[in-house]
Image: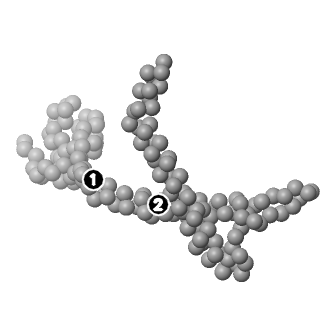
Amino acid sequence: MLNGFKDFILRGNVISMAIGLAVGSAFTAVVTGFSNAFIVPLIGLFTRGTGDFSKATFTLDGVEFPYGLFISAGIAFVITAAVLYFLVVVPMNKVQNRFAAKEKEEVDIKAALRDCPHCYTEIPAVASRCAHCTSQVEPDPEARALAGLPSQPVRS
């Protein structure tokens, strides 16, 4: 029973997740410190107050509600999300787009269909002969060009 637990804990993804949580917690502390040191005073300049919302409260029927704590946490969340987006997500997307193999679009030459003028069954637009009635038909020049085939006149 303990061997299974040991195997679970020592898996690489569990350890990576634990390290990620520790780094995330430290990053949150840094962003909260930045918010309290720089952003809150800047908000105080604009609102002509202290900018410290953590002490803002209101009282209703003798019960005190510290709504300022929620505002401070919201500001810290927005700053954390913005920093993560602009310093992690955007650069990673650029790196992935730069190194992603640009696959050439393959064209399915049988995807474009049309009706045979003789038997009215569906045939590929690039076909020069109907598979059902074996009549010769004029291939669609646009479909042939899209498929990379040279345009050919119909032989009698």
| Drawn side of residue 68 relative to residue 86, left or right | right
* Dot 2 amino acid type: Tyr
Residue denoted by label 2: 85
- Along the line of sight, the residue nearer the viewer: 153 or 87: 87
* Dot 1 amino acid type: Ala
Q: Residue at x 50, y 57 (%)?
A: 27
* Residue mark closest to the camera, 1 vs 2: 2
Which of the numbered marks, if any, corresponds to residue 100? 1
Residue 117 seen: no
Check contact, mark 1 vs mark 2: CB within 8 A: no
Q: Give how far across and how far down residue 65 sits, in percent.
A: 81, 58
| Drawn side of residue 119 relative to residue 51, left or right | left
Q: Give how far across and how far down residue 76 sits, in percent.
A: 60, 62
Q: Quadrant of the C terminus?
A: top left
Q: Give how far across and how far down residue 148 sits, in percent.
A: 15, 51
Q: Residues within 10 Å of mark 1 (few under 14, many from 20)?
A: few
- Along the line of sight, the residue nearer the viewer: 97 or 13: 13
- Along the line of sight, the residue nearer the viewer: 68 or 137: 68
Vertical position of residue 93 compared to residue 122: above or below? below
From mark 1 to mark 2, how far is it between C-alphas? 20 Å
What sort of colour scheme is used for the picture?
Answer: one colour
Quarter holding residue 55: bottom right
Mark 2 or mark 1, which is nearer the start of the sequence?
2
- Along the line of sight, the residue nearer the viewer: 96 or 107: 96
Q: Residue furthest left?
A: 155
| Drawn side of residue 126 relative to residue 100, left or right | left
Give the SS element for disc 2. helix
Q: Residue at x 17, y 46 (%)?
A: 138
Give the SS element for disc 1. loop
| Drawn side of residue 27 relative to residue 98, left or right | right
Vertical position of residue 6 compared to residue 78: above or below? above
